[in-house]
């Protein structure tokens, strides 16, 4: 009897049919989308052949024009630094204006729309518009990344402010402190540490993006890289890519050290 | 009574204060140096307002009639590139994430290999990946899809590895003690704990990919970016405005969808 009972026992790990159906649907979708996009195995295989020649031409990387490379890298870093400084500077008040627990909705609504507008376009699109507005060169890149920074830090900063404890704010308001004092003594001490974290993250992101805005003419190493692509100068391209990866890794290392200082 | 005067409360040790000061000073010096040497041409700045005004004048009125013939197909293609790229990235990121989780694979060399893959995927920008794959596969949606997939591996894989490392070891020990083979330990021990985080990450990445797949067409990797590029090269600014408006609406819709699904699964 007890043997039969054990035999009929429910399976400990039941088959989850909805999940299986979802996986199946995902595979079907992948096939449909691949068909729609005209992605096929044959093209992929041809591409792999091209890829092999491409990689072969990249080796060995050509560092003979290192002077140009260094100049471009410096410009890239400069764009990232200036854009981060101004982006952080502007996103502080805008993030504050967008915090719904401190300000009435007629203030937060425009600020939130502005942040959403900054966030929803990719930096390249901003870069194109700014190249049209202020011409080729690093200024367009700086403006682009300032807007990208406002979109990112502004949103996170507003969310951080919305999560603060309101007790110090109430205490200060009750004792009759003006709005500026409430901000400086009750709000900022609670969020400033997180703000520094966002800012250092955004600096990393800006550095990555400043290597790219040059593709549309907004300064930095991207322009040289795009030119190397179009001239099939793949060994110089390999040198550029390696130095970009090196730069990004260096900045990640520095930002880890900086975060440790502020912990 | 006098001892109280000797104690002054300070939040940080002198060393910490020095380090903070050094960071701020370093940043200020770097900023000043950059501002002095960066090549900004002031003449371009003076006529910027005129240029912006001119830009908006050319963009208005938006040429809505172009949408059915020129934009719709490219927009659908963009969404397919983003979704298929995300699916491919998920398939490739799961093994890399497992390799990177130090509580599953206990070989430091393999963990390092996974870290290397993840970091190189993330440090190359999407547009640069797109350029590379356009050179390899030729212009078109195939290059775009692979580009989106490769760029996403780093993001999805890193966060998945972190989710796996945060798993509670209790159920895993129980399964190992009962003699479960490795696939069962992973499927029944690790996966149920990491799955909600994983789907959240994948959805978030899909949202990002929709934005990115809208621009990779600028370098020839398919999608609506190619329409944007053509319109700009022909100075059809009213079509540019239409493309920007459609990108904006799709991005907003994607964000709303993701937020709603996230609320349900997490």
Image (cartoon, coloured by chain):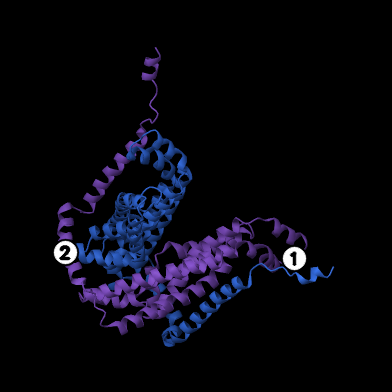
Chain colours: A purple, B blue
Q: Residue A78 has which mark?
A: none
Please give left or right for residue A242 compared with residue A178 in the image. Answer: left
Total marks shown come to: 2
- Secondary structure beneath dot 2 equals helix
Q: Which residue is mark 1?
A: A177
Front tag of 2 and 1: 2
Q: Nearer the viewer, residue A229 or A102?
A: A229
Quick check: A30 above or below A170?
above
Judging depth in this view, the residue of B232 and A37 nearest the camera is: A37
> Residue A198 location, x and y as percent?
51, 64
Q: Residue at x 50, y 71 (%)?
A: A87
Quarter of the picture holding the N terminus of chain B: bottom right
The residue that mark 2 highlights is A50
Confirm or deny contact between disc 2 and disc 1 (CB under 8 A).
no
Quarter of image, res B135: bottom left
Q: Determine the CA span between mark 2 and mark 1.
A: 69 Å
Q: Residue at x 32, y 41 (%)?
A: A23
Q: Horizontal placement of A150 versus B210: left or right? A: right
Tell me: A111 left or right of A129: right
């Amino acid at each position: 009897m007890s043997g039969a009972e054990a035999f009929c026992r429910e399976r400990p790990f039941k088959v989850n049919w909805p999940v299986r159906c979802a996986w199946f649907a995902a595979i079907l979708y992948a096939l449909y989308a691949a068909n729609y996009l005209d992605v096929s195995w044959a093209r992929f295989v041809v591409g792999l052949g091209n890829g092999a020649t491409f990689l072969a031409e990249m080796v060995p990387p050509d560092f003979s024009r290192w002077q140009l490379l260094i100049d471009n890298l410096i410009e890239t870093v400069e764009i990232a630094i200036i854009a981060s400084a101004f982006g952080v500077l502007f996103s502080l008040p805008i993030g504050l204006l967008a915090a719904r627990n401190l300000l009435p909705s007629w203030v937060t609504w425009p600020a939130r729309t502005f942040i959403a507008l900054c966030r929803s376009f990719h930096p390249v699109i901003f870069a194109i518009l700014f190249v049209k507005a202020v011409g080729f060169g690093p200024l367009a890149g700086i403006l682009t990344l300032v807007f990208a920074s406002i979109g990112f830090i502004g949103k996170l900063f507003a969310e951080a402010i919305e999560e603060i404890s309101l007790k110090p704010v109430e205490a200060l308001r009750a004792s009759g402190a003006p709005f500026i004092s409430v901000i400086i003594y009750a709000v900022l001490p609670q969020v400033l540490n997180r703000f520094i974290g966002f800012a250092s993250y955004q600096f990393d992101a800006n550095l990555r993006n400043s290597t790219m805005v040059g593709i549309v003419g907004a300064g930095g190493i991207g322009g040289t890289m795009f030119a190397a692509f179009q001239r099939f100068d793949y060994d110089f391209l390999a040198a550029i890519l390696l130095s970009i990866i090196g730069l990004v890794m260096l900045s990640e290392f520095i930002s880890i050290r900086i975060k440790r200082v502020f912990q | 009574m006098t001892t109280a005067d000797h104690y002054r409360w300070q939040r940080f040790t002198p060393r910490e204060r020095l380090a903070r000061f050094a960071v701020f000073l370093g940043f200020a010096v770097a900023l000043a140096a950059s501002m002095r040497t960066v090549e900004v041409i002031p003449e371009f700045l003076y006529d910027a307002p005129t240029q912006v005004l001119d830009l908006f004048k050319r963009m208005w009125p938006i040429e809505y009639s172009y949408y059915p013939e020129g934009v719709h197909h490219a927009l659908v293609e963009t969404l397919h590139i983003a979704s298929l790229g995300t699916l491919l990235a998920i398939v490739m990121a799961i093994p890399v994430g497992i390799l990177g989780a130090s509580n599953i694979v206990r070989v430091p060399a393999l963990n390092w290999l996974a870290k290397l893959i993840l970091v190189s995927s993330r440090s190359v920008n999407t547009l640069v990946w797109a350029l590379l794959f356009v050179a390899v596969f030729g212009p078109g949606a195939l290059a775009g899809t692979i580009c989106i997939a490769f760029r996403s591996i780093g993001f999805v894989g890193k966060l998945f590895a972190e989710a796996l490392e945060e798993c509670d070891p209790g159920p895993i020990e129980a399964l190992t003690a009962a003699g479960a083979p490795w696939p069962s330990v992973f499927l029944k021990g690790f996966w149920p704990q990491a799955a909600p985080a994983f789907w959240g990450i994948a959805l978030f990445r899909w949202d990002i990919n929709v934005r990115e797949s809208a621009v990779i067409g600028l370098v020839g990797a398919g999608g609506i970016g190619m329409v944007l590029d053509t319109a700009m090269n022909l100075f059809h600014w009213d079509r540019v405005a239409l493309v920007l408006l459609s990108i904006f609406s799709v991005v907003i819709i994607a964000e709303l969808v993701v937020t709603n699904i996230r609320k349900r699964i997490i």
